[in-house]
Every structure is written in C-alpha cells, then in structure tokens.
Image (tube, grey):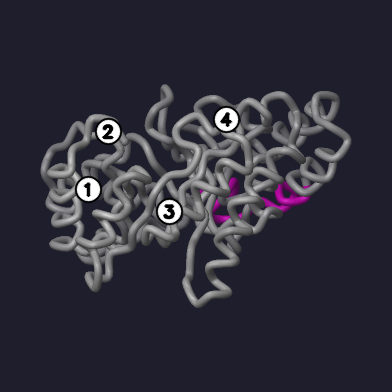
Amino acid sequence: MALPSPETLIDELNALRADVSAAGERHIDAAVAALETPASPGLAGPEPAPSLSVQGLAARIDHTQLRPEATDADIEATCHEAIDHQFASVCIAPSNVPLANELLDGSGVAVCTVIGFPHGANQPSTKAHEARQAIQDGATELDMVLNIGALRSGAVADVEHDIAEVVAVAQRAKESGRTVLVKVILETALLTDAQKAVACVAAKQAGADFVKTSTGFADGGATLRDVALMRQIVGPALGVKASGGVRTSDDVEAMMAHGATRIGASGSVGIVTGATTEASY
C-alpha cells in the first residue's frame, strides 16, 4: 500500500480549512508544517524492519481483552498470559481494572484501560471522571477514544479540549507520584487522511503521550499507511500504537519500521510463539 503523498495531503488539508472552526486553523497549520519535511519513519518511507527477540517483541505489545462478553475467568487468563510472556500491558475494560490490578501487582506488566470506548461520544467531563476512577482502581495507561463526530464536523478545538480533560487527570496523578500514559484512539477507518493529520495535532497539543489507530470495533484496523502518516505528524515526541489486524511478528516488525512503538493485539500469544491466530484487535 502506497504511503500518502505529502503534497497531496497538504492540498487536502488546505481544502479542509473551509470545514473547520476558526480555532481549527492552527491545527491545519501545524499539520502542514509537519508534512513539509518528510521523515523516515514517516512519509519518506520506513526504516529497516527491526529484528526483535521474543522478549523484545512481547515488550511492545498491549495484550488486549475487550470483548463485551469477557468474564472474570477471561480476564484472569489474559493477565496470566501477560505475566508469562511479559507483555507491556494488559488492556481491559474499566470494570475489570481492579481485578487486573490485583493480578498484575509486582509483575512488571502495566494495567491499561479504555476511556470513552468504543465510540468516543461521551462528554469531556464524563471521560475525565472515567479516567479518575480508572487511575484510582489501578490503571496506569489510558486509551481514550477522541470525539470522532466532533472531528468530522470540523470542531477541532473541541476535540483538543476533550483530550486535554483526560490528559489533565493523568497529569494530576503524575504530580502525586504515579506515571499515567494517555493514548488517543483516532479510529482511522472513519477518517480522511486530512482528518487523521488534524487529530494527531490535536492529541499532541493536548499533551497526550501516544496516538493510536483503532478501537478494533470499526471496519478496518491498523495499516502501514496510517502508521506512517501518524508518525510523520507527531514526530518523535509521541508514541504511535497500531491496533487492529496485527497477527504475526512480521506484522509487528513492519508496523515498527513505519513508526509504531506499541502494538495492540488480542492474539498476542500467537504473535510471540509463531502460532496461527485469527485475532483481529
């Protein structure tokens, strides 16, 4: 799949000016500036694919169990798998955070949960409350869904405010001695390239730590094209998480060559053991 042309994308961003609020102009300006010097990884192309050990591979994966029908036994199994393979984190629904926190205590595996999931349409105050509760329950990584409808409506400043409310909660936790990461889910399958670029700028300016491709609940997941675009816009300052459709170690290495620093997958065990998996998150 060809990477987006920076020149074409700049034209698309300039065309988007007519559809965004006046405050959104600065997001477009920042996105255009990021595109003017193509980088690698980014829109200049990938870096050489990294050669990872099994341990190095596992350390980049958020082991994910977000099925709505998941039971306590499923969460326990996911946590034990994460401990056995030393994945970066376990990513589970907010109601499962206390159990995961208990099971993962002292293991070196982080507790990650989702905010405003999966549609992102909650009020900013609701997302902030959800984030505070999740941190209180033991989460140290928050994967929040931005307000997709607001972004598509051109209300880019509102999107940044939405993200900033959750970031502010995480920063208050940091002031208390806890490091809490915020990853912003764009849901790339529902956005144009220009909207993806603007969303990345909003996440960066709001103080997020990562941008992330997908929830796993829309049609389409992570693509090399989207990962390269996201890396180009955020530069080296933020992480990029690729989620959705990553099934093999080769997939992981390709995503990393294009700029991903974290992977979200439910078939994580298959990825690190080389087993065949149909997991699509």
Q: Is residue 83 above or below residue 280?
A: below
Q: In the drawing, does residue 108 fall left or right of residue 180? A: left
As helix, strand or loop, the secondary structure at mark 1 comes to: helix
Q: Secondary structure at mark 2?
A: loop
The Cα atoms of the two marked residues, 2 and 4, are separated by 19 Å
Q: Earlier in the sequence, mark 3 or mark 2?
A: 2
266 vs 122: above or below: below
Name the N-terminal-most of marks 2 and 4.
2
The reply to whether dot 2 and dot 4 touch (C-beta < 8 Å) is no
Q: What's the amino acid at mark 1?
A: Ser
Q: Which residues are magenta?
A: 33-45
Kindly identify the amino acid type of the residue bearing the numbered disc 3.
Ala
x and y percentages locating residue 125 in the rendered image:
62, 43
Find disc 3 in the rendering and name its residue. 134
Report the front residue among 31 and 133.
133
Report x, y in % for residue 45: 53, 48
**Residue tagged by mark 1?**
268
In the picture of the structure, the residue carrying the numbered disc 4 is: 121
Q: Nearer the viewer, mark 2 or mark 1?
A: 2
Say which quarter of the image contains residue 266. Answer: top left
